[in-house]
Amino acid sequence: MVSPTQKISQRSTGTNGVASADNKREDFFKKLAGLRPRVKANSMIIAGREQTLKDTWARVLAGAVVVNRKLPNGLEVRRFDSGNFPKYLPGVVIPEIRRAMEQSIKVGSGQEDTVSGEYLKDLDDDRAAIAPYYRVTDPNHIFFTAGISGAILTIQQLLLLNTGQGMLIPNLTYSTHLAVATMLAGNGSIIPIERDPTTGLPDVSRYSKQNNPFRTAGLATVVTHENPLPIVHTAEVYRNSKGTGLFDLAEIETLKDGIIRPFVVDLIYLSMSWPKTQLTIDKMIELADEKHILLFVNSLSKVMLEPGKRAGVIAAYVPKRLRAYAAGGVIRGLESLFDLGLNPQSYSSVKGLVAAHDILTAERDGTPHPTLQWIRGEARRRFIGEDGNGGNQRFMIELSPYLKPLYPNIAIESSGYNVFVVQGEDLPWIKPEYKKAVLDRVRSMMEQANNHDAVSAFDDYMKRVTPARMGASDILCADLFMETGVLFPPIDRFFVLGTEPEGVVGFRPVMIAEPNEFHKVGALIKEFFETRMNK
């Protein structure tokens, strides 16, 4: 009996008995295609992909079948799924940032737009320029990253993989934090904080000295100005009179074992927010009370409208009394990872990031920036109207009796998103047979578009999972996309995988799109839900 390996190695020969290179190559792949795969798929990678926004069925379908903004059935595609805010504010730029990036490269000089492996030494001035915004006194504690995703990956590589402990994070949050943790350490490494059903804030009231999540958490990650919810954390989430704030709880465990649990503080929407009482960097430092290491992460992508530049930063705020502790721990670890060159940066992106922080520092110190003021004002107007009770939020609420905000009474103060859910009994997208029917339509549309690679990838994936396992929100968004051309991201990607509340099915639209764009698709969305819910 011939083994698979022997089969592949058999020679193909030409007419004269001498092997032809082209024939050998063709024969190799022909025979390889007939063999069963020997490499087992990594379950953590699969789960991590199922946590990302890019691998939703609607997004996959959009990439596989859309041509000239149309589906194979002729429907025009209208996307309300992207965090790429320039799509919704076309032509708007921050002139100082754009000018700094353009001037950083001498055209025709042969200067490369990349930072060398010695960039920690090369960019001392740039790091020193950014440090004051985060109240960081040592420029060596500033690390430039490939966007905020690069910051998340770097920190989790260091603190999640190396500690062997979990990551505490509010459930229903920015999916990249969840996806990276799942890919690196598995779904079980994430310790979710559930939310208060009235305010939508992380519900820390359920904790106590006896029920302390930091017993198993090696770090905490918080998005103070949130996504996908449009809320801003209050100080009570971190310090409160009952001693159940996150800083309070972390200190209890530190006094037991002597281990400092760093807090990753995602600030990407801080500049996009408008609450009367702002949870600022200074306020977070005050609440930490010199007892915690704060790893602030930020980037150019949102209010600065430069998502393609992949410019991010980790700013490590280390209190004076903890510097010796951090020097041999988190700081040394970050330096080691950056010495490996895992965060390639363009020189122009770094200069853009510096210019952005000059603006942010000036705003904090009392000098508003006209373009940023306009962006915040326009985003708020589109989201909730001039009076705070209109805009796209009101339109979505009134669109269909089957749609409602997940948290109807929250204070809308931040970002460009909200979460809407379908209310009603006997939701079709929960049923296994309906899930299969939708997925059959996905495959059929791929065939209709003659995308054989997409069909092959679909078939391969479906060998590993069953339709019943698919998230109901993912199925809803695929169904809606094929029927109307409207693309929303499903809310299951913002929950820790497998923790989406039973019966909660919905999506997260971009709420700062031009209101006219919502109005154009309103009738399609309304008809879709009336048809599906009345079958």
Image: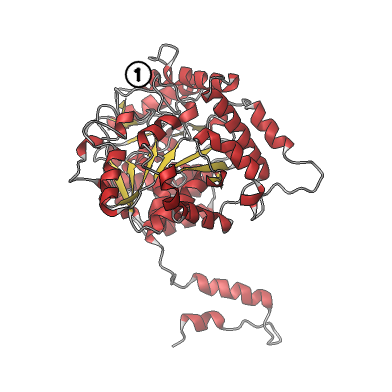
Residue toward you, 267 or 54: 267
Percent from the top left, x then y, of residue 185? 37, 57
Q: Quadrant of the N terminus?
A: bottom left
Image position, residue 429 (x, y; %)? 30, 40
Q: Is residue 396 above or below residue 13?
A: above
Residue 71 drawn at (x, y percent): 52, 38
Where is 394 relative to 156, above or below? Answer: above
Residue drawn at point x = 35 percent, y = 59 percent? 164
Q: Secondary structure at mark 1?
A: helix
Up-down relation of residue 478 to residue 160 (above or below): above
Name the residue nearer the viewer: 276 or 333.
Answer: 333
The colour scheme applied to this rendered structure is secondary structure
Tell me residue 173's x, y (percent): 37, 39
Image quadrant holding the C terminus, namely: top left
Asked where in the image residue 20 lies, by quadrant, the reply is bottom right
Image position of 497 (left or right of 15): left
Q: Residue at x 39, y 50 (%)?
A: 50
Mark yes or no: residue 80 visible.
yes
The part of the image, by quadrant, that contains residue 393 is: top left
Q: Nearer the viewer, residue 243 or 138?
A: 138
Q: Is residue 441 visible?
A: no
Residue furthest right in the image: 108
Q: Amino acid at mark 1?
A: Glu
Decide if residue 345 is on the left or right side of residue 8: right
The answer to whether residue 364 is left or right of residue 289 is right
Q: From the viewer's side, name the closer residue of 506 and 379.
A: 379
Q: Please give the residue where the numbered disc 1 appears in the rendered image.
A: 398
Number of residues whose C-alpha sits closer than 10 Å to that of mark 1, classed few (under 14), some (14–19) or many (20 or more) = few
Q: Residue furthest left?
A: 210
